[in-house]
Amino acid sequence: MADVLSVINPATEALIQEVPVDDEAAVAQKFKQAKRAQPEWAALSLAERIKPILRFRELLIERVDVLATLLTSETGKPITQARNEILAVPGRIDFFVENAADVLAPERVYCEPAQALPGMGTLEEVIGYDPLGVIANISAWNYPYFVGGNVFIPALLMGNAVLYKPSEVAALTGGAIADLLHDAGIPKDVFMPVIGSGLTGAALLEQPIDGVFFTGSYATGQKIAVAAAPKLIRTQLELGGKDPAYVCPDANVAVAAAGLADGAFYNNGQSCCAVERIYVHADVYDEFLEAFMKTVKSFKLGDSTDPDTYLGPVSRKPQLDVLADQVADAVAKGAALRWGGERLDRPGWYFAPTVLTEVNHTMTVMQEESFGPVIGIQRVASDEEAVGLMQDTPYGLTAAVYGTDRERAIAILRQLKTGSAYWNCCDRVSPRLPWSGRGHSGLGATLSRAGISTFLQPRAWHLRAG
Ligand code: NAD
């Protein structure tokens, strides 16, 4: 394991900082501290745990400029999108705080009156809820505030201690999140950042943790599942996607084109629920393509620190080769390259926004997660053909249908095995709804009440009055 992580600015390729890495011994020590601190934290009243979370909420807003600048520097995320991400966290906190008491409340599910026999007083059956204990929160870099906060905020509210491993691509932001939580009053040992690459993540899984909540790729998710299996602990995996969208012949084409272009290219396509495949009915194909291209060509690409920039660099250098390979594979198999298609000749890891048409499912661009500014658009002759193609993936995160007929859209979406279904919208997450994947997109759910109760385990209380 290297001693330091080199944090590089994807827009300039300059070294920002070298960050010390937690080795196995440091990880073990952090686990010990968290294990010792957790019972005291869980013994506080819910109101006492809510207080520092609400202070964290205030600090996010107060310090948004500094935090957004840091996030932009290490991931290349355009500054406006970095601010949007941070400023959306308070809404999620509000949902968690408003629902925490209800989720935690014990439920009396049965009460038997006392009998006139010795030792046979009233019998109550009560379901109580205990925190899991010390959990590992292993996170991705693309939305560190969202994917981290969806775990550590409800986990802390429910009385758990959290060992938080930010991605190596967002390590400075991970440290900043920890500082913010500590400044807000979360005890240092109750929330501990664990800094490093996948090796540090693997070392964290060696510890006797009580749960693992992972966000990242399918390939790493499988490794997490294997490492967690013998421990028999709560394991949640929020993984990748190859999310499809279908434009019906009755769609409002202008709305569909604008919505899907944003869904495909927001955050440079580096969203788990980015639109990755578009199927368009032949009746509206030409009109859709024209409107879609117009929107894509209007996106401002450039300096991530400019508030008007919509497309920055990709956050990880190896992704440039993945994208170039997908484009080359598609073109070799007969796709038409309508726009972009290559790395830009400028400093930084910039890949031109890329639109491919005449694509089919023999091409990797329609099969494997692109996770970048590349989209394939395929013409279809019917709803049935669209459904067949949308289903042709091992992933199942989201799917979208654009059209004016609600029943038709819902009938299509019902046939797809996805955790989220969108009608006339896409690339959307709500704190009130469960965020989950089917198939290779993962296990378990965050957000919604299910995403709070997942940090608890039920206990059956059989209480007989003496
Ligand atoms: P990744 O799988 O490369 O890394 C994720 C995290 O796992 C990082 O912190 C990494 O250091 C750690 N890790 C790597 N190997 C490990 C190991 N053997 N043991 C323990 N930890 C290990 O993913 P990424 O590049 O950070 O994120 C991109 C992926 O995440 C995409 O596939 C994207 O779709 C997915 N994602 C999913 C969601 C969702 O909610 N479903 C949200 C965001 C991102």
Image: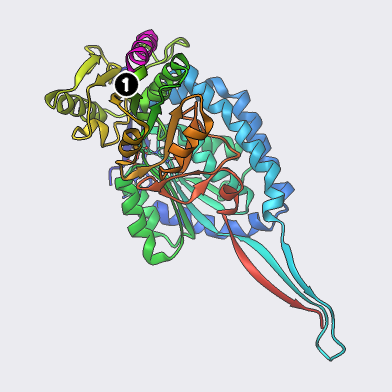
Q: Which is nearer the eye, 387 or 196?
A: 387
Q: Is residue 203 above or below residue 384?
A: below
| Label 1 residue SS | helix
CA neighbours of label 1 inside 10 A, class few (<14), some (14 to 19), many (20+): some
- Residue at left 45%, top 21%? 251
Direction from residue 90 to residue 206 in the image, left or right: left
Q: Which is nearer the eye, 184 or 155?
A: 155
Quadrant in the rendering for residue 243: top left
Q: Position of residue 430 (x, y in %)?
A: 56, 35
Direction from residue 126 to residue 346 in the image, left or right: left
The amino acid pointed to by label 1 is: Ala
- Residue at left 57%, top 46%? 188
Which residues make up the magenta segment? 285-299
Q: Which is nearer the eye, 223 or 167?
A: 223
Q: Position of residue 205 (x, y in %)?
A: 39, 56
In this view, which residue lies farthest toward the left? 332
Quadrant of ligand 1: it is top left
Q: Is residue 245 above or below residue 461?
A: above
Q: Position of residue 392 (x, y in %)?
A: 29, 41
Direction from residue 379 to residue 270 in the image, left or right: right
Q: Is residue 189 inside the magenta stretch?
A: no
Q: Is residue 55 above or below residue 441?
A: above
- Residue at left 68%, top 42%? 97
Which residue matches tag 1?
282
Task: Decide whether the magenta segment is chiefly helix, strand or loop.
Answer: helix
